[in-house]
Image (cartoon, rainbow, N blue to C red):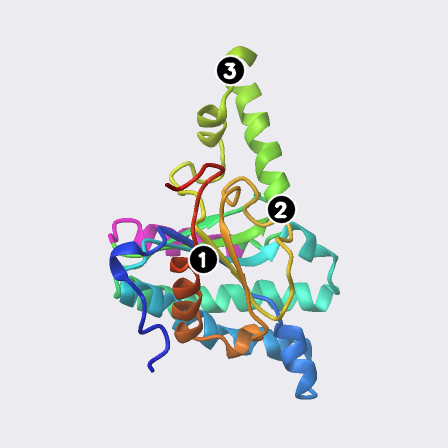
């Protein structure tokens, strides 16, 4: 049977999030530098994005660089910054031609090179009017940082304490339009959230796979969606 053949396209999750884990282990298993694993993950990323667009998924968010990733060796951080810049240059127009809207969420940081910030702005501007898949890249992102920044935004806006509720806080998240995550996929056999979209994943279905990210393809995405569709989502209540 074709992978993902059982997908019911009338019941797709609105928003799928992906923790792209295992690049370093993929490289290590082949006797290669960790940076080669990150580079190999590009094909997995593009195939997954194109697969999401193919089936009509509305939102796909990937964890590209976390606030904790600054702790990695400086050489790896420099590679990741340069790689993401190069990826944007090489792929943003290709995704634009597929009607994909590119967005970024994360905390502004002076450590992000100016040229990388420029490429981010260019990709967002180029694809802003597209109406297909919204592909969001979490870059210099942390779930706790986002909630802290949203709380600070409420204070700066002068919102009285008795007017603060979930809807008010959502308006101050990095992307107030982003829907809650229905399905989160994490690769490489790790079973953690790792500070990713903590607010948005309050009721997410979680799918963990042993596949290392460079080996992940759209068929793996489709399989995860089939698992999601087989689950009973109750949101704290009871289905009758």
Percent coordinates x, y for residue 185 in the rendering? 51, 61
**Residue 227 versus residue 203 in the image, above or below:** below
Toward the bottom, the furthest residue is 30
Crowding near pointer 1: few (<14 within 10 Å), some, many (20+)?
A: some
Q: Read off the residue under disc 2.
A: 110
Looking at the picture, tell me which residue is in the foreground, 158 or 18: 18
Looking at the picture, tell me which residue is in the foreground, 62 or 200: 200
Percent coordinates x, y for residue 213 in the rendering? 55, 72
Q: Earlier in the sequence, mark 2 or mark 1?
A: 2
Q: Read off the residue under disc 3.
A: 159
Helix, strand or loop at disc 2?
Answer: loop
**Residue 31 versus residue 217 in the image, above or below:** below
Q: Quadrant of residue 234?
A: top left
Looking at the picture, tell me which residue is in the foreground, 140 or 126: 140
Q: Read off the residue under disc 1.
A: 119
Q: Earlier in the sequence, mark 2 or mark 3?
A: 2
Percent coordinates x, y for residue 164 in the rendering? 51, 18
Marks 2 and 1, how far apart at CA:
15 Å
Q: Which residues are magenta?
A: 115-131
Residue at the location (61% across, 73% down)? 23
Marks 3 and 1, how far apart at CA:
34 Å
Residue at the location (64% across, 53% down)? 194
Helix, strand or loop at disc 1?
Answer: helix
Marks 2 and 3, how far apart at CA:
29 Å
- Is residue 15 in the magenta section? no
Crowding near pointer 2: few (<14 within 10 Å), some, many (20+)?
A: few
Residue at the location (74% across, 57% down)? 71
Residue 177 bears which disc, if any?
Answer: none
**Residue 87 versus residue 66 in the image, above or below:** below
Toward the front, the furthest residue is 240
Percent coordinates x, y for residue 111 in the rendering? 64, 51
Total marks shown come to 3
């Amino acid at each position: 049977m074709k992978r993902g053949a059982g997908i019911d396209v009338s019941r797709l999750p609105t928003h799928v999030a992906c923790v792209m884990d295992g690049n370093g282990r993929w490289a290590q298993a082949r006797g290669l530098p960790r940076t080669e694993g990150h580079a190999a993950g590009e094909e997995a990323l593009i195939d997954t994005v194109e697969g999401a667009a193919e089936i009509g998924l509305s939102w796909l968010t990937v964890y590209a660089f976390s606030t904790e990733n600054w702790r990695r060796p400086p050489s790896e951080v420099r590679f990741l910054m340069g790689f993401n810049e190069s990826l944007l240059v090489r792929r943003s127009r290709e995704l634009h031609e597929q009607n994909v809207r590119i967005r970024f969420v994360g905390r502004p940081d002076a450590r992000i090179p100016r040229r990388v910030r420029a490429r981010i702005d260019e990709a967002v501007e180029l694809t802003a009017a597209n109406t297909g898949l919204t592909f969001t890249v979490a870059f210099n992102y942390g779930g706790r940082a986002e909630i802290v920044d949203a709380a600070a935004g409420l204070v700066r806006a002068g919102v009285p304490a008795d007017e603060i509720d979930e809807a008010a806080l959502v308006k101050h998240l990095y992307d107030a339009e982003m829907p809650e995550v229905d399905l989160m996929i994490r690769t490489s056999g790790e079973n953690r959230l790792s500070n990713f979209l903590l607010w948005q994943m309050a009721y997410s279905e979680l799918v963990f796979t042993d596949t290392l990210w460079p080996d992940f393809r759209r068929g793996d995405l489709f399989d995860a969606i089939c698992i999601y569709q087989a689950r009973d989502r109750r949101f704290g209540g009871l289905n009758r």
